[in-house]
Image: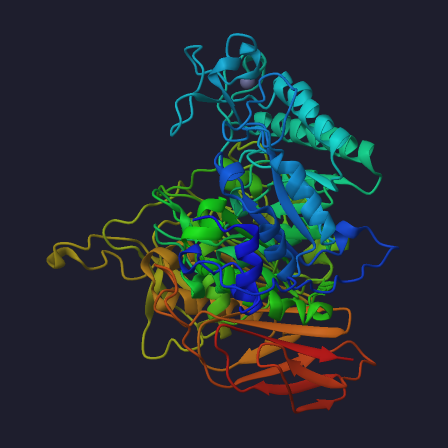
Amino acid sequence: MSLSRRQFLVLSGAAIPGQLLAAQTAAGPPAGPAPKPIAPARRALDPARPWDQQIRRIGQINFNERDPVELDVAAWADYWASLHVDAVLVSVTGILAFYPTQVPFHRRSRFLGNRDLFGECAAAAKKRGLRVIARLSPDLQWDDALTAHPEWFMRDAAGGFQAHNEEPHLYHTCTFSTYFTEHVPALMREIQAHYDVDGLFTNGWPPLGSFPNCHCDVCRQLPPSDTVAYWEKFTERSVELWQLYDAIAKEKKPDNLFFANLGGGLRATPNLHRLAQVCQWFNCDNQGRGGEATPIWGAALQGRVASAVMRGRTITNVTGAYSTASGVRWRNVAKSQAEAEIWMDQTVASGMTIWYHWVGAQTGLGEDRRWQEIGHRYMDWHASHDAHFTPRRSLATLGVVIGQRTHLFHTPPGEGKMDEFMDGLYSALLEGRFLFDFVHEDDLGPETVGRYAALLLPNIAWLSDRQCGQLRDYVAAGGSLLATFETAMFDETGRRRANSGLADLFGIESVGPVEAPNGNGFYARIERPHEILRGFDNTNWIPGGAYRLPVKAAGAPVLTVVPAYTAYPPELSYAPVAKTDEPAVIVREHGDARLLYFSGDLERTAWRSGHTDLSRLLTNSVTWLLRGRQPVTVEGEGAVECFAWETGPGFAVHVLNYTNPNLHRGWLRQFYPIGPQRVRLELPAGRQVAKVELLRAERAVPFRQTGATVEFAIPQISDFEVAALHV
Ligand SMILES: [Zn+2]
């Protein structure tokens, strides 16, 4: 089914650019002269800034072994050029070589023959003005290297090699071995010696999602892989290899660079704050959702994680145009158009760069062509508004602390993963339409947290004395704080404290172990009116949570705990004690600072139960912390996620429309447009808006500026809207 070059040229003449590759050979080549392929103008880069900090779009067809047979190199390069990408990924690999390698154990694709697919693609990309990133995959190696280099491979506890779960002749390589310091550098240098490349990229390293569990000679000298001590060694190894590979990249040209996959959202493996100190380009391998019940906002959350550590440097996120899912996947069939688009929308909104990805030329240019038009249409739109996709600074004044240690190592009472705490809080923040950033736990100094009016600590259980001290300083400087459940009950190594490290701030004392639900969760009894109880009319009781850490505190509580009791049989479902003195929430004010502590697992239980009282309690609480003030508000109906950035031309407010029956499960089938959204911004003093332009609707809208306040309406939003304010 592959298209010959001549057929391609002939067919492309009659097609719009997005359908360039959609033509099929079945029709046969029509007669007539071959028209020129469309060559879009390349965007001029600022020579004073590194090129890798100016990229806007990336393209990749991930090669498979057959691609030397299937891939029409010119068609491949024309497609990506027509999408206005700045760079393409071209596979070198390490698992299979796509060029005539001389490095031992770098197995050539058995379809390579006399071809040099890497070289042909690199040259074709260069001819079209595209940068070339050489993609390596150092995570797996074939069994024929086991005898010669047993030291390269991961071992299990019994000393056996660790085979891949899909291809039994492939084995996992060990990050701590010479495979990474000798073999991988040999591949990198071979490529750089023969080809004009602009950067080096590793897939599959650092590992995503979980730590390697290796018992090789080197790893047996390391702490156990489920400990913070191992995490620190693992992070240092990641930093060391990153620096080694970046130095190798720069042997070719001083403005070349190395970068790798760092996705995994909150469960990224290396310490991201540490790695960001050596990383100029953070790629998120967060390609899409599917299968299990995952919320729609996965790419936006990933963008927040990466932005917390990269501070304006390049972040890319891969959108898999193929069928992403957990468990079974279809690598060579497209996902729904709406799902691919909402992922790219989130990539853009959260300040990342789009990286559009397909696997294999057989389907990439032949069998399933649906993804091509989706990518083309999106990138065409995106490229026409480049100037506004230059996020310089988030306008959010609310920070959510992300605790990598807690997420990686803490098992909260009540089983499950820490992610549920963030899912519940994230969901409530979207319901409340709050503008927020993530803040890394190792970045709590005043230079970072000073810009936030409030910080939220969603059960950040592991915090060091130093981190607690930084939060105390933040509050002393007038910052407001919300913490839940076991926040700071453990130090940075997981040692349990008698009292929370923030107990003095909240005026609490721990009075016993965590209590579990008993059919019923515990209840919160309303003792006196407060702004955080807005909307709870006509009831004295609301749900408190499932699990709680019993505490005592001085003063009259706003909410008291009614402990959990039997839910079934209903004959026994009544409170043995209808009222206690135990607070369910601590509400305090210190000068300008407002403080809230919930002793229950409020946000996780909101997520698990879907209870509207719990999410209301959370949104009311955040509103109270912020004194109702936000620099940007977007009001209207529908489930949305908002970002607001200071940009090159001025400001940009991004509104993602999640109003969809597939918000929590299944890919989006279509978009369900929402009606008018009223936007209000408080600009820094002295900024006069000249024009408000809706980039998706492609039109300007009327606005009113009164002093520093700008107001306008977005009449309708399908999937996404970007209101660009020119100042
Ligand atoms: Zn090892």
Q: Nearer the viewer, residue 214 or 482?
A: 214
Q: Residue at x 68, y 42 (%)?
A: 122
Residue 400 visible:
no
Query: Nearest the camera: 704 or 700?
Result: 700
Q: Which residue is at 51% across, 86% downward?
A: 676
Q: Position of residue 586 (x, y in %)?
A: 50, 59
Q: Position of residue 179 (x, y in %)?
A: 62, 19
Q: Decide which of 413, 206 is in the foreground and name it.
A: 206
Q: Quadrant of the C terminus?
A: bottom right
Q: Is residue 619 above or below residue 444?
A: below
Q: Residue furthest top?
A: 147
Q: Quadrant of ligand 1?
A: top right
Residue extending furthest toward the front: 31
Q: Position of residue 11 (x, y in %)?
A: 52, 62
Residue 593 or residue 661, whichever sits in front: 661
Residue 622 position in % (x across, y down): 54, 67
Residue 533 seen from this side: yes
The number of discs equals 0
